[in-house]
Image: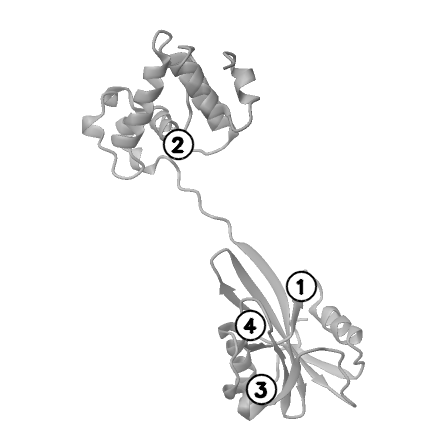
Amino acid sequence: MPQQFDELVGLPGIGDYTASAIMSIAFKKPYPVLDANVRRVVSRILAIQTEDHATSQKIREFLQVVISKKKPGEFNEAMMELGQTICRARNPICERCPIKSKCRANELGIQSEIPMKLSKATIERRSLVFILQYRDKILLQENLSGLFAGMKSLPRIAYSGKSPKFAASKFLHLRGHDKFEIIGRLKVRTHKYTKYSDRLTPIVVELQGKIGLKMGNVSWVMLNSLDEHPLPAIDRKIVADFLNLVKSNHRINHQLF
């Protein structure tokens, strides 16, 4: 087996963690092991409340200074065990910690705030949703696959946030229909899922002339029978907004374009 760190990490399946463990335990070389437990212990000792590359470097430098030169393997094992049993992520048992007096986080009373809890970024997807109205009907698309398979939904396209009027016109032109009036925009709706959120901007378009849209898996549905069709919750809210305006005879907001 190689006895140099660089040679060890060059072997298949061996990374920095495993190489450091081998160097310290098998060859008694002062290579600190840095896993989640050790990282948490040192972060609390130094009261570090950030999570970035500079933090990792600071932790490594600290470990390189304090690691036992005579018993590096025992030091690494002790640090990992300390993180597993005493300096736990939740409910650390500080009163039993052998290095409590050297812990800056304990001194400041912020040990429960370290490590910093990172919020998961949510991806926002923006879409234009079209309520394509022809007399007393609107167009619904059938979803053959995906999250809403077996349900119908309002047609939609990805939206960059620029002119919704231009995007709506382009959408219809590309699908072979040139006679229409863009009535206006309804209330923007947002729906959150586990890893992303949908921000939907509904556009009401009144189609005119002979209908010949080049769209597959679609059907025209009477306004008074929309309740009979399975729609995703967010689409149902948009349809409800539209129907409320129709019933109240209010004009849809033109000024938002």
Amino acid type, residue under disc 2 in the picture: Ala
* Residue at image location 56% in from the left, 70% down from the top: 188
- Image check: 32 left or right of 41? right
- Which residue is rendered at x = 29% and y = 26% of the image? 81
Relative to 89, residue 47 above or below: above
Q: Nearer the viewer, mark 2 or mark 1?
A: 2
How far apart in space, not on screen, are marks 3 and 2 (Cα)?
A: 59 Å
What whole-number distance in Å separates the C-alpha atoms at marks 2 and 1?
A: 40 Å
Give the mark, 4 or 2, whose residue is nearer the N terminus.
2
Q: Which residue is mark 4?
A: 149
Type of amino acid at the residue the image marks with label 1: Tyr
Q: Quadrant of residue 42?
A: top left
**Label drawn at residue 58:** none
Above or below 178: residue 193: above
**Mark 4 → mark 2, Cα distance in angstroms:** 41 Å
In what element is the residue under mark 3? loop
Q: Upstream in the sequence, badge 1 or badge 4?
A: 4
For residue 36, which numbered disc appears in the image? Answer: 2
Identity of the residue furthest to the front in this view: 1
Mark 2 and mark 4 in contact (Cβ < 8 Å)? no
Can you identify the residue that label 3 sits on? 250
Give how far apart the Cα atoms at labels 3 and 1 are. 26 Å
